[in-house]
Each structure stands twice: as C-alpha cells, then as structure tokens.
Image (cartoon, rainbow, N blue to C red):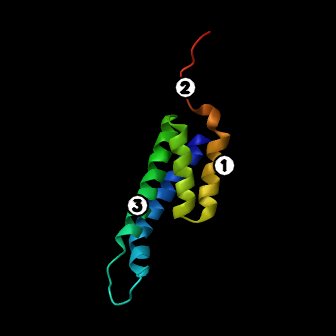
Amino acid sequence: MRIAAGIVMILAGLFGGILMLPLAVLYIPNVLYSHPDPLFLFIGYALAFLAIAGGVSAFKRKYWKLCLAGAISSAVIVPLFLGILAIIFLVLGRKDFKLSAVTVPT
C-alpha cells in the first residue's frame, strides 16, 4: 500500500506544481496587473515539493511523518479525492515503515 501512496503523492505533487503557475496568474487580486501572486506561488510550490518528498520517502520506507505530511499536502493542492486516497493507502501501509524510535532495554 505504501507504493500506491507514493505514486499518488508524486503524481499529486507534479500535477499541483504544473498547475500552480496558471492558477497564480488567474488569481490576480488587482485586474490591472498581470503578474502572478508570489505568495500563492510559494505556498503552492512548497506543498507540491512536500507531496513529492513524501512520495519518495514512501518508496524508501522511511520517515512516516514526512509521508503523512506529503499526503495531507497532496489533499490540499489537487482534487481532494487523490489526497484522501494517499492518506488511506499510507495509513494502511504504516507497518511497512521502519521504526525510527530508539528503545532502551530494561
């Protein structure tokens, strides 16, 4: 399930990153200016990068929290059903991830 979650997150990140520039150009607070809103672009590309990084770490079976953040960000930047699919696949495949917590024997 983690591979499916990784694929969905990477696709969501790429899809969201490609669509950010036209959406930023259309989201112009003042019609007189035709430049994209830089804050909108920065937030959009940061979320897209987070989704791609979460997808890559899902393939590597590391950093479950990063994967979860990537799945949540993919729910924000693309249609909601892709993000929900990524979250469901990631939660179902959580047992595949390596535990990073150090346990002290008693």
Between 70 and 58, the one lying in front of the other is 70
Task: Say few, some or many: other residues with alpha carbon within 10 Å of mark 2 (under 14 / 14 to 19 / 20 or more).
Answer: few
Nearer-N-terminus badge (2/1): 1
- Which one is in front in this view, the residue at disc 1 or the one at disc 3? 3
Relative to 77, residue 30 above or below: below
Between 59 and 21, the one lying in front of the other is 21
Q: Amino acid at mark 1?
A: Ile
The residue wearing badge 3 is: 45
Residue at the farthest top position: 106
Relative to 29, residue 9 above or below: above
**Residue at 34% of width from left, 90% of height from top?**
32
The residue wearing badge 2 is: 101
Secondary element at image label 2? loop
Distance from disc 2 to disc 1, alpha carbons, whole Å, reads 23 Å
Displayed quadrant of residue 33: bottom left
Q: Amino acid at mark 2?
A: Ala
Residue 9 position within the rendered picture, expressed as x and y whole percent measured from the top left: 52, 52
- Which one is in front in this view, the residue at disc 2 or the one at disc 1? 2
| Mark identifier at residue 88 | 1
